[in-house]
Amino acid sequence: MSSSQIYLGVVGVGGVGTAFLGQLSRLPNPPSLVLLARTTQTLTSGTGYSPAIAASDWQSALSSPAVTTSGAITPPKIVSYLQAAPGHSILVDNTSDPSLASAYPLFLRAGISIVTPNKKAFSSDLSLWKDIFSAAASGSALVYHESTVGAGLPVVSTLRDLVATGDQVTRIEGVFSGTLSFLFNTFAPAAGSVSSSAQWSEVVARAKQLGYTEPDPRDDLNGMDVARKLTILARIAGLDVESPDSFPVESLIPAELASLPTTREGIDQFMARLPDFDTQMSAVKEKAEKSGKVVRYVGRVDVVTKQVSVGLQSIDGDSAIARLKGSDNIISFYTKRYGDRPMIIQGAGAGADVTAMGVTADLIKVMERLK
Ligand SMILES: NC(=O)C1=CN([C@@H]2O[C@H](COP(=O)(O)OP(=O)(O)OC[C@H]3O[C@@H](n4cnc5c(N)ncnc54)[C@H](OP(=O)(O)O)[C@@H]3O)[C@@H](O)[C@H]2O)C=CC1
Ligand SMILES: N[C@@H](CC=O)C(=O)O
Ligand code: NA
């Protein structure tokens, strides 16, 4: 490499992407932002990789003659552009796009490091997971994905540290969805908390507006977002989980709405029709309440028996899970070293700023390790 400058490409400027660019603009020694893309537009610094795009003001950069603008860009074109930069380069993927995710091995083999909150690459087919980590191991490019589980909470790095230092992880369990945590904490609060008369569909709309949900909120409600997170954790703990649909996952999508299209129109139709099914979730809540419990959506990886499970549970009202607030996650690592009392990580598990924090912190680690 002829330069110690680090070059950065960023794809995705939604909730997390925008918060990330804000944090990037405040770093004391930021990398040089040379590519910024969304579905319809791409900005690049051109063939000279200079001047850098202003992260604090990327929308105005669209009208700057120093920056080249074009339409959508494909993963191979991003690889070519970043690979030819006169220094190390890093891709930050702030989308939930599976096709960009499946190109990570291409990036890594081209020497481009990856930082991302996008779960798709790490939780789809096991062959893609293996390809990503063998591509990283065969060269100098790095891959960091802390915000794929628990947003900015140190979940992925902690589990990797436990495994790398030779501890034996026996079980991982807790609440892994910021959206589902918010929904149940609000819709079915524990006794003594502020009670709510909100309907299920109203709380879903609020979670979407607060930026907790996936771009398509059905990916939260069908349990797949939690299934993906558990797939990632199970794999780091050493289990060869084939895919997030290779174990039972309980969906909260009403059967009548299950076949709506996965387009933006499909999302709108789903949100518009969800109020028709509010009584179904009220019945689930009341059933738990009759036995003095609250309903929560929990996940569990039993590393010893190699079982993964995801779904609703009725929980005692005075337990830590029942008493969570807001979008908080709680993740307990049971290990040989920690014995009967697990290591517990708790805090906001969704939201643009806390997710971007995990992405920015990963970027800083990669920059330090590339030097
Ligand atoms: N929100 C949260 O709390 C958390 C989110 N995450 C993950 O962070 C990622 C981003 O989430 P969030 O910001 O909420 O999502 P948004 O829907 O707000 O933003 C997604 C962005 O990605 C862009 N995009 C999507 N597909 C492509 C593509 N093929 N090429 C270029 N750009 C594309 C969109 O472009 P356009 O602007 O043109 O629509 C948009 O800018 C997801 O993977 C999510 O799972 C992880 C942890 C927590
Ligand atoms: N939609 C997800 C976002 C973080 O991964 C969630 O609600 O947890
Ligand atoms: Na995390």
Image: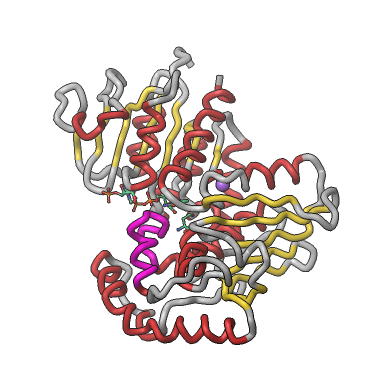
Magenta part of the chain: 202-217
Say above or below: 199 vs 111: below
Q: Is residue 178 left or right of residue 207?
A: right
Number of labels in the image equals: 0
- Residue at 41% from the left image edge and 86% from the top image edge: 279
- Frontmost residue, 189 versus 106: 189
Q: Quadrant of residue 38?
A: top left
Q: Position of residue 32 (x, y in %)?
A: 37, 22
Q: Is residue 215 left or right of residue 114?
A: left
Residue 125 in sight: no
- Residue at 16% from the left image edge and 26% from the top image edge: 64
Q: Is residue 204 left or right of residue 134?
A: left
- Residue at 57% from the left image edge and 58% from the top image edge: 229
Is 127 inside the magenta-drawn segment? no
Say above or below: 354 vs 1: below
Say above or below: 350 vs 135: below
- Frontmost residue, 258 versus 104: 258
Q: Position of residue 93 (x, y in %)?
A: 41, 43
Q: Position of residue 252 (x, y in %)?
A: 47, 76
- Frontmost residue, 202 versus 153: 202
- Residue at 48% from the left image edge and 14% from the top image edge: 4
Q: Position of residue 197 (x, y in %)?
A: 41, 75
Q: Quadrant of residue 82?
A: top left
Q: Is residue 255 left or right of residue 267?
A: right
Say above or below: 31 vs 114: above
- Which quarter shows the C terminus? top right
- Frontmost residue, 296 versus 197: 197
Residue 286 in sight: yes
